Image (cartoon, helix red, strand yellow):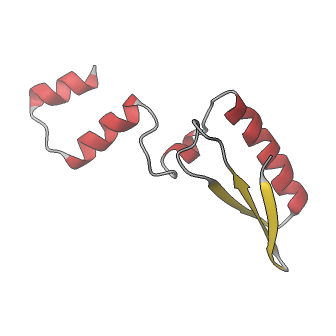
Amino acid sequence: MATKRQRNSESWEFVVRRRGVLPKPLYLTFKDPAEGEAYCKRLEALLDRRIVPDEFKRQAGGIVDLSDAIDQCRDKVALSRSGDRLLAQ
């Protein structure tokens, strides 16, 4: 279950942790605590099935799967045509 705390009079912070699924905890902020609880419940149901929504894959900053590693490689390294074709497969 996500931990929750009131940050100020207008917002609530939720922290979602899943070892082996998320490289780092996710910190989410909501104005309505009921909305935050409902969102975290749906998110945790996905994470329990080892499904990480796309919006959190890059946010976590780590490489989540092979396609992420290939994308990061293409962004950082100048590839030859043959190398680019190889990674496109």
The residue furthest bottom is 9
The residue furthest right is 34
Quarter of the image where the C terminus is located: top left
- Where residue 19 sits in the image (x, y, percent)? 61, 40
Q: In this rendering, would 53 be left or right of 72?
A: right
- Where residue 85 sits in the image (x, y, percent)? 18, 24
63 or 85, which lies in front?
Answer: 63
Q: In this rendering, would 65 be left or right of 87?
A: right
Residue ID at (31%, 34%): 70
45 or 32, which lies in front?
Answer: 45
Asked which quadrant contains residue 46, the reply is top right
The residue furthest top is 89
70 or 17, which lies in front?
Answer: 17
Q: In this rendering, would 24 be left or right of 69?
A: right
Asked which quadrant contains residue 71, the reply is top left
- Where residue 25 sits in the image (x, y, percent)? 61, 53
Residue ID at (44%, 46%): 62
Check the image and report above or below for 65 versus 5. above
Asked which quadrant contains residue 28, the reply is bottom right
Residue ID at (14%, 28%): 83
- Where residue 8 sits in the image (x, y, percent)? 80, 79
In the rendered picture of this protein, how many numbered marks are placed on residues?
0
